Image (tube, rainbow, N blue to C red):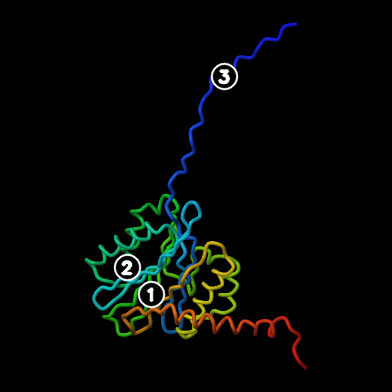
Amino acid sequence: MSVTAIPKLPYKPTKPYIQPHREAKAMTIVVGLKCQDGVVLCADQQITASGAFKFNECKIHTESMGHTSIVFAYSGLPSLDKEVREKMMRKLDETGISEDYVYQAADEVLTEMGRNYSDMPLQMLIGTTGNPAEVFNEPTLLKFDGRGLHKADSYCLLGVGESALVRFFVEKLYYSWMPIQEAVNLAVYLVRKAEQYIDGCGGPINVSWMECLSLSCQTLPEKDIQNRINLMEKREAIFKKLIIEKPSS
């Protein structure tokens, strides 16, 4: 009995795999806190690129115009953040910086970039130091979550800040009438905990704040941030005594 041979298919060489280029993205945490006498913004610096290599880059940027300032903090693609900032500042060059003008410029720029059609890989907090023409000027904070732009809530968490761990800490420790330096400490502490326990966060921490009745934005040097972290982490042992251990008689 003869067996019919099955003809071999012609050899087709396999094309080498070429990994598509993907832009670096910011798997980050950004914290925004409103407090008794101002607004605080804080973020880590780690950016994770395609292929899992990482580098550090500041994600809080301050622009000054005359006697006023505007502060941007972002989570997402660095190039989109830069595009938004550059386009907004060109618009604000013509109008000046105020709450209404900043909102209008942000709305126009983000709409032009397509936020009404699909989610953008970008989240932002935009803070202004207030209107110098007003006697009781207060800093304001806007939030863009990838789709909507609105006035920020009492506290805002972007990126991995929406994790259960960070939200637990902020809901237990935050109160809206806290003094601004306590808010700075809390923001730094939240970012530090995210760096320790959530993948994608790391690097130096940046923190900036805007005080009521002030037209400037202030920052804390890295050395002072680390000193505050060290002091707060030494106090963590108190948690055990207050929550877990049996109270003394």
SS category of the residue bearing label 1: strand
Residue 102 shows which numbered tag? 2
Instruction: State which mark lies toward you, 3 or 2.
Output: 3
Near-viewer residue (115 or 4):
4
Task: Say which quadrant the C terminus sits in.
Answer: bottom right
**Which sits in the foreground, 192 or 85?**
192
Q: Earlier in the sequence, mark 3 or mark 2?
A: 3
Q: Amino acid at mark 3?
A: Leu
Amino acid type at mark 2: Val
| Position of 83 relative to 127 (above/below) | above
**Residue drawn 45% across the image and 77% down it:** 34
Q: Are marks 1 and 2 in contact (CB under 8 Å)?
A: yes
Crowd around label 1: few <14 · some 14–19 · many ≥20 (10 Å): many
> Counting residues from the N terminus, which is met first, the one under dot 1 or under dot 3?
3
Residue 180: give x, y in percent of width and height: 45, 83
Write the residue at 27% across / 80% down.
132
Q: Residue at point 44% right, 64% down?
A: 56
Whole-Å distance between the Cαs marked 3 and 2? 65 Å
Which three-letter amino acid code belongs to the residue tagged 1? Thr
Q: Indicate the quadrant where residue 219 lies.
A: bottom left
Nearer to us in this view, 55 or 119: 55
Q: x%, y% of residue 142?
A: 40, 68
Name the residue at the left extreme: 94
Quadrant in the rendering for residue 105: bottom left
- The residue labelled by disc 1 is 140
For label 3, the residue is 9
Q: Secondary structure at mark 3?
A: loop
Residue 106 in the image: above or below residue 173: above
Q: Residues within 10 Å of mark 2 (few under 14, many from 20)?
A: many
Residue 40: quarter of image:
bottom left
Residue 199 pos. (x, y %): 56, 62
